[in-house]
Structure formats: C-alpha cells, structure tokens
Image (cartoon, grey):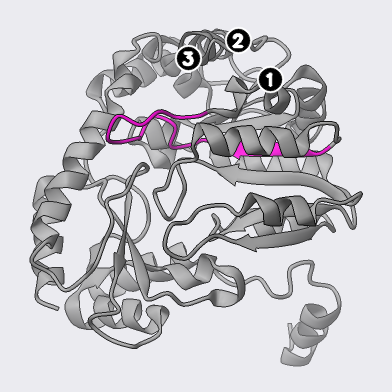
C-alpha cells in the first residue's frame, strides 16, 4: 500500500484512528531489546503448578483435543458456580449464566460489544486497564472518563452521580485495581448500588485479581450486592490466579438475560477456548487451597520487595491487592514518566510501566508501576538496581 493510500485509509476508514500500540508491548519489547529486567508487563517469572500441567497433559492424552462446547466445558462451569456459592453465597446457573472465555480481555470485549450501541455512554475510572476505552469506541460508544484521586485512587461518587444521564449505558469498575493496587470497599459498592438503582445501566466488574488481596482485606465482589448482581458481567481470569497468563483462560458470570447476549457475540468471536485446559481446571479448582492461599503468597512477595526498597529514593504506599506496586519518583527527577521509564530500561536495564498512559489526558503524577509476581532472586536484582538510582 502506498504512503498516500495508507494516509487516506487512516484518516477516513480506521475505526480506532487514535489508538496506539499498547504500553505493555512497547515496554516489554524495549526490555527484550535492551536485555533489561522486565517488571513492566504483568506476568510471573516462576512456573505454574506441575499438578495443573499434568492435568492438562492428561486431558490431551485422553482425547480432549477437539472443539469444546461453545459456552465452555460444563464441568468447569459447574465448578465455577460452586466457587461463587462458597465464596460469596451467590447463585449462578452453570448452564445459562457462566461462559468460559479466552482470558479476561476477551470477556470484557465481548460484554461491551454485546450491549453497548452507537452513542451510548460508558463511565470508566482512570487510570484504567487499556482495553476498556478502545472497545467502547470500536462499537461507536462514548467513553466518559472519571479521573481517580491521584494519591488515594478513590472514586468521587458525587461526580459519578452528576454524569449519569439517559445516555449512560454502562459503568466499568476494577477491583482489586490495576494499576494502583487499591481495593473497593463495602461502602464503595453500596454507593454504586444506590446510584444504579432504578436505572437500566449495566455494570462490568473486572475482578481478575479477586484472590490477590492483602492485609486481611476482603474482596467485595459485585455479586454480593443484589442491586448490582442483577445488572453485572463479572470478569475473572484463571491466568492471573494460576500463574499461566499465556494460556489465556477466563470466564464471565452474568444473569441469564445478559449471558444470552454475551454468547451471541462470543460464538462468532472465538466460539470456544482450549478444551484440555478447561477439563484440567474443572478438577483443579475443586481444591480451594489452589486459590485461597494466593493472597498470602503474593503478600510475602510484596513485603519482601518493599522491605528492600526502603533504602531507595522512591516513595510508595504498599499495594492493597493485585501483584503490582506503584513507585513515586518525584524525589529523583522531573522527567515525564514515559521518558523516565524508557531511560531506566535503556540505561539501568530495568523495565517498568509509566502510569500517565492510563490517566485522563495522560496526567503525569511521576509514578511508575512494577510487577512483583517474580522470584525472590528477580526482586532482589530489581531492588538493587532501583536503590542505586
């Protein structure tokens, strides 16, 4: 395609003309090029449970190598329903209300695509995971951004109320929150429930880090609140929970009327996902300890890393959840966070994520995000580098 044709297409036909390459791809690519320690993209550098891998292998050997049912293997959906019942006393019908997806991002894309129409407004809290906004734009919707408090990352519920109108189709929340690591409280969820009461507004509750919460806090799932459950797509991720992000396995739980719409898109988007892994997970998640111990597991890593970082010039407040930690570098340089992150990767051989890319109008608060889902050896090396800056 000629340069002129490319320009014409971009200006007149592109559905996402302002969309750029994901910051995760940019920073991981730079880390690979510079042979830098990669704390940018959120993936563990340690192995998955060998027992889970054995279960997947066994499923392959037993012949589960053709298409799975479109909504997912029933045994896995049944196990997920039981998990909701035990953890949250919430009832989901595995036949009509749970769908297995190719990771959390696909589930979010499908939920938005299935329900948001042209000119519908979708409230998004920033900093936000970078798939929300482009997906809304792709279907002709209008993202309505609310910037979280730059220090506390709290939601201003009065601002939310003021933005609700007849065009509001959906609200998207994320707790535990990527990138800040903050956790929505019971009071937050009650406020949201009250705001959405007597409306037809839908909710996506991105709960992919539901089991990674620290300091004896609890996860306030949307399904705990009847006024939210009846309108919510709950998004979850096996990849985040079981240290195998490359498998791209997740699920969506929603009332039957929403799941019906979700599956209309899902069947033409991916149809079904990796069959042997579903069979393996159906067995694996029946052992609650495989996910209930996750908070303690990652809190030890958080505490180990932050104890080493006490000698650094970075400022930080310990993360409440997820496997991410924010580091404020305002005592070090006045550089733009993207420029600083890039320089750290090239000169200091450590890759991080600048937070401004997730903020409204690229608000720069001099903060980087690092991933501590790493071995102690990796975290030790990372802290040694960062403490010298």
Q: Which mark is residue 117?
A: none
Q: Relative to 191, is 333 above or below?
A: below
Q: Secondary structure at mark 1?
A: helix
Callouts 2 and 1 close, C-beta under 8 Å: no
Label 3 to label 2: alpha-carbon separation: 9 Å
Q: Secondary structure at mark 3?
A: helix
Foreground residue, 29 or 105? 105
Label 3 to label 1: alpha-carbon separation: 31 Å
Sequence-first disc among 2 and 1? 2
Sequence-first disc among 3 and 1? 1
Label 1 Cα neighbours within 10 Å, binned few <14 / some 14-19 / many ≥20? few
Label 2 to label 1: alpha-carbon separation: 25 Å
| Quarter of image, res 104 | top right
Callouts 3 and 2 close, C-beta under 8 Å: no
**At which x and y percent is residue 17?**
74, 74
Q: Which mark is residue 74?
A: 2
**At which x and y percent is residue 21?**
55, 70
Q: Dot 3 corresponds to which residue?
A: 279
| Quarter of image, res 245 | top left
**At which x and y percent is residue 371?**
30, 54
Foreground residue, 216 or 169? 216
Name the residue located 55 percent from the left edge and 35 percent from the top edge: 187
Name the residue located 45 percent from the left edge and 29 percent from the top edge: 219
Q: Secondary structure at mark 2?
A: helix
Q: Is residue 159 visible?
A: yes
Q: Is residue 167 left or right of residue 378?
A: right
Magenta residue span = 201-220
Q: Is residue 246 left or right of residue 146?
A: left
Q: Dot 1 corresponds to which residue?
A: 226
Name the residue located 57 percent from the left edge and 52 percent from the top edge: 155
Label 2 Cα neighbours within 10 Å, binned few <14 / some 14-19 / many ≥20? some
């Amino acid at each position: 395609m000629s340069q002129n044709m490319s320009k014409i297409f971009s200006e007149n036909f592109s559905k996402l003309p302002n969309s750029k390459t994901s910051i995760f791809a940019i920073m991981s690519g730079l880390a690979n090029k510079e042979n830098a320690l990669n704390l940018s993209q959120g993936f563990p550098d340690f192995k998955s449970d060998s027992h889970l891998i054995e279960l997947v292998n066994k499923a392959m050997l037993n012949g589960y190598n053709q298409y799975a049912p479109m909504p997912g293997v029933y045994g896995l959906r049944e196990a997920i329903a039981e998990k909701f019942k035990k953890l949250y006393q919430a009832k989901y019908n595995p036949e009509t209300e749970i769908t297995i997806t190719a990771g959390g991002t696909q589930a979010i894309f499908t939920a938005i695509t299935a329900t948001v129409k042209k000119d519908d407004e979708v409230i998004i809290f920033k900093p936000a995971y970078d798939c929300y906004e482009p997906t809304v734009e792709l279907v002709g919707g209008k993202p309505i951004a609310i910037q979280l408090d730059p220090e506390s990352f709290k939601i201003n519920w009065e601002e939310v109320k003021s933005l609700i109108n007849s065009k509001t189709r959906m609200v998207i929340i994320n707790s535990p929150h990527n990138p800040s690591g903050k956790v929505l409280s019971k009071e937050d969820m009650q406020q949201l429930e009250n705001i959405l009461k007597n409306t037809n507004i839908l909710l996506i509750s991105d709960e992919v880090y539901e089991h990674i919460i620290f300091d004896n806090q609890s996860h306030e799932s949307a399904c705990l609140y009847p006024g939210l459950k009846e309108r919510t797509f709950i998004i979850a991720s096996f990849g985040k929970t079981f240290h195998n992000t490359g498998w791209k396995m997740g699920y969506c739980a929603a009332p039957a009327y929403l799941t019906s719409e979700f599956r209309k898109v899902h069947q033409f988007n991916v149809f079904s996902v990796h069959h042997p892994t579903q069979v393996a997970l159906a067995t694996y998640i029946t052992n609650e300890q495989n996910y209930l111990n996750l908070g303690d597991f990652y809190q030890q890593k958080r505490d180990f890393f932050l104890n080493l970082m006490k000698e650094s010039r970075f400022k930080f407040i310990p993360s409440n959840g997820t496997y991410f930690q924010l580091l404020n570098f305002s005592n070090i340089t006045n550089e733009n966070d993207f420029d600083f992150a890039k320089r750290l990767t090239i000169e200091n051989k450590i890759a991080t994520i600048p937070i401004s890319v997730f903020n409204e109008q690229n608000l720069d608060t001099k903060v980087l995000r690092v991933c501590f889902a790493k071995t102690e050896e990796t975290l030790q090396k990372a802290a040694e580098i960062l403490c010298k800056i």
